[in-house]
Amino acid sequence: MNKTIKTGIVGYGKSAKIFHVPLLKALDEFEVRSVLQRTKSDSKLDFPDVKIMRDMKDLLKDDQLDLVVITTPNHLHFDQAFEALNADKHVVVEKPFTVKHDEAEKLIRLAKSKKRILTVYQNRRWDADFLTVKKVLKEKLTGELVEFESAYNRFRNYLREDAWKEKDLAGSGILYDLSPHLIDQALLLFGEPEQIYADIRAQRGGDTDDWFEIDLFYPSLKVKLKAGMLVPEPTPRFIVRGKTGTFVKYGLDRQEKDLDAGKNPLDEDWGLEPEQQYGTLYRESDGGIVDERIESERGNYLEFYHQLKYSIEKVQEPPVNPETAQKGIKIIEMAIESSRKKSVLDIRF
């Protein structure tokens, strides 16, 4: 009989409540045993029998605890992951992995020395739209690829005083919030870029950035990653442009919205997009341009934890390789440098 993975959650804000708790509750393979909350106790609403800890050291003293899921503000990720690995726990870190790539390297070395699984919650790998893009590329529906654009835009023209992501803290701002997803997807699809150019701005006049464009240069491909907070109009989530056609996908994956609404990720229709949200493939035919709707793949955030359980049991590669996440942090650091210097930089990992 397979062993239930005893799990502790560090932090209990939006990240934990929306992106982790519903998945862990849906899976019998995981048992949430303890939660680190500094002052509140609302985790009892989700897990009535959970042990609420006020100090990280107390949480880690539990010898029965197998896994620690870190969902705290970005600047705390390194120290808390380091503590958890030192206590011989497997560790999931919310994105971004760390603030600095050398911090990520230290965690990777420690995990290897402790023979523990270390992974990063890059849930957007299992978005319906991204899985569909992977299918489009695999089937070469646009021909040889020449240009790829990925954008994650929002509209909120005011600053939230209570939001740590909008304060002058290490790892705050939209660059560290959203670019880890976009960069991770680009690395999965295309591997390591050769050069980078970035433009990072605070368009709303706040203490940290709220808009970025990152250009990644490959030998025969240009990749643009962008996000902003002042975009009220619909913009494509993906544009995949090749020599024989272009695939355009609007709309965001629905899983975050459904999790926030309390829907069960085990429902039969989980992760399925409505037909009106399918992407469109444009190609030349008989001297004209024809378009074709491409059915979206099913999104499935549960797959992260399915793969994690298998990784822990079999002591093999985790669902998200930490070395890939480390490269993502390196690209973020180089984007900051490129924006400051206003120049194209060579990337050396």
Image (cartoon, grey):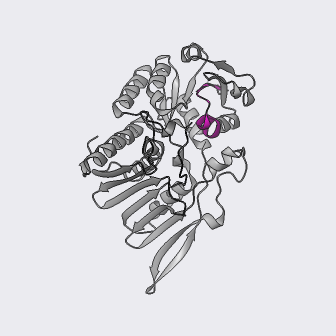
Say if 135 sits above or below 283 in the image.
Answer: above
Q: Position of residue 291 (x, y in %)?
A: 53, 76
Nearest the camera: 87 or 154?
154
Say if 250 sits above or below 195 in the image.
Answer: below
Q: Position of residue 228 (x, y in %)?
A: 47, 53
Residue in the picture at 66% in, 31% down: 29
- Residue furthest to the bottom: 287
Q: Position of residue 25 (x, y in %)?
A: 69, 34
User: Is any atom of residue 171 visible in this view?
Assistant: yes
Nearest the camera: 145 or 315?
145
**Position of residue 241 in the picture relative to residue 343 (left or right):** right
Quarter occupied by the N terminus: top right
Labels in figure, total:
0
The boundaries of the magenta stretch are: 3-20
Q: Position of residue 334 (x, y in %)?
A: 31, 43
Nearest the camera: 177 or 127?
177
Q: Would residue 291 be counted in the magenta stretch?
A: no
Residue in the picture at 33% in, 30% down: 102
User: Is any atom of residue 319 visible in this view?
Assistant: no
